[in-house]
Image (cartoon, coloured by chain):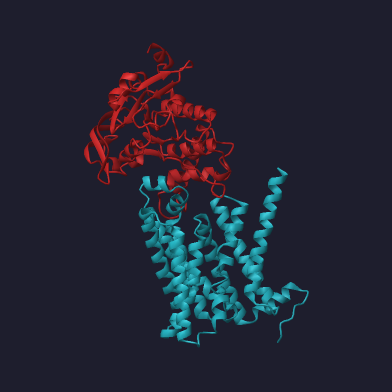
Amino acid sequence: MSGVRRAMPEVAPAARQPGCAPPAVQLSRAGVALGGKRVFADVSLSIEAGEFLAVLGPNGAGKSTLMKAILGLVALSEGSLTVLGRQPEQARAQIGYLPQRRSFDHATRVRGVDLVRLGLDGARWGIPVAISRRARQRRRAERRRVQEVIEMVGAERYADRAIGECSGGEQQRLLIGQALVRHPELLILDEPLDSLDLPNQASVTALVRQICSAEGVAVLLVAHDVNPLLGYLDRVIYLGRGRALAGSVHEVITTTGLSALYGAPVEVLRTGDGRLVVVGTPEAPHHHGDRHG
Amino acid sequence: MTPSLSLDPVSDVRQLLTFPFMVNALQAGTIVAVLAAVVGWYMVLRRQSFAGHTLSVMAFPGATGAALVGLPSAIGYYLACTIAALAMGRTSRLSQYGGSDQTAAIGTIQTVGLAAGFLFLSLNQAVLGGPETLLFGTFLGVTRGQVLALLIVAAVALGALALLARPLTFATVDREVARARGVPVGLLDAGFLLILALAIAATSQITGALLVFALLVAPPASAQLVTSAPLAGLALSVGFAVAIVWLGLGIAYFSIYPVGFYITTFAFGLYVLLRAGRWAWSRRR
């Protein structure tokens, strides 16, 4: 146990002062049923402003459904949920969202910078005609913000290229930039590390951690595998068998913790380099760390 | 006066513009080129060329049906295209839940349209200038009234597109995020199909049903080969389309071959040229 503890260095607290802001997400005995089938139930959880959380669990455990509930795209069947102190639908404008498995094929003729820009003004009707001085100022400020975000995610080199011609890692950075451009208070990233190679997984995780600390954004990152995230997370939420377990990595991803969650013996092993392997989840072969099982 | 090509381009153009029918054709062609190039740019971005093709085929049942009941063929074009667009919007909503293939549904609509057109044609043999005009257009017989009607339709379609421009782009390239941000993606799908229907109905009155695509696909596709910046792409698309139409009309005037042939050939030639150029450019780097 102490070894896992050492592999999890303490992370600096968020820049935005907690305490005065309402929790980014507050779930109380929440549950969702889709088409009469219960996805998860009795989930109680509070996520503070500026926290970095991973949402883990086997395929079909309801990770994406939980994210959609927080976005107000899926209604709760029981319990309550507030996002940034409001109803989920009313908080949408303050949430940056990166959906699951999104990639742009070669023929997508839109530049990275356009994609980021759509995050800022894509929901606005009409075409921008900057006649008045205020409109021109606003336009300049928007252009500055797009540039700022592109620099923040380190995409200056390829932002003017067609998005379809960028690599997976480059696309992911631009998409994170798009999610960030409106100064969100909550960032929801659904499997952003999926389909990235190991060096890119590491660099994107480091980028998200840095943004989380620098901008004081609460981040919910859905992942299949906790290993690339080790050392960066504040807490994890583990979904399994329709229930959820939240806490630090060394509290949750343990033999006793996961066995209690599944109600069956599950073993957590630690490899020599500090990586975690979960063995024997009842939904095998969809066990933790197995991406496409 | 028979058309004769001199070596002096200024006098050639002046000769061309002395005929009211040429002036009408140039004005109608310009309106259609701008409309098709802008709407087509979105169609190519949204990969709805097959839906566009189906809408253009609707000119056939539209015109033959209108002739059958004694309405102007233009009204038939607009009606048939609008009905088909509404039907397609409906199937796209169904296919989201039912998981059926949308291209199959569009193909079915296309076949029904063609069959209806064939029926109307056999019920009424004396259609318009015969099916050939319908398929390949009547660029040189455009009246003042038609020019005015085209101008109004183009203004409505482009105005609607300007209103939808940014949410439509958002919903096209990044549907999930747009939906999460509250953009009504389903309504935009249906709205764009209606705008596309208007543009195609207007264009096919001039170019005919078969050659709509010369202006609707080739200029935007060529522009997207050159740039992926939206504004530059739209401007380039319009420039290409207008140049193609002017060149086609101008040369057809002095030639015995039909105008549709020239317009299609220039559009195709431009696309091939840019594709080859792009290939050479990427090899050089």
Depicted B161 relative to depicted A228: above or below? below
Q: For chain A, what colour was chosen?
A: red
Specify whether A76 is left or right of B174.
Answer: left
Please state the horizontal and vertical placement of residue A127, each as a whole percent of the image: 45, 54
Q: For chain B, what colour was chosen?
A: cyan
Answer whether residue B126 is visible to the viewer in this image.
yes
Quadrant occupied by the N terminus of chain B: bottom right
The number of callouts visible is: 0
Camera-nearest residue between A228 and B140: A228
Considering every residue shown, the one lying at the far top of the view is A2
Depicted A209 relative to depicted A191: above or below? above
Answer whether residue A20 is visible to the viewer in this image.
no
Residue B210: name its quadrant: bottom right
Seen at 43% across and 47% down, the residue is A121
Considering every residue shown, the one lying at the far right of the view is B7
Camera-nearest residue between A252 and B74: A252
Depicted A34 relative to depicted A125: above or below? above
Residue B10: name its quadrant: bottom right
Please state the horizontal and vertical placement of residue A133, each as a whole percent of the image: 45, 48
Please state the horizontal and vertical placement of residue A171, each as a whole percent of the image: 52, 39
Quadrant occupied by the C terminus of chain B: top right
Please state the horizontal and vertical placement of residue A9, each as a whole percent of the image: 42, 16
Residue A282: name its quadrant: top left
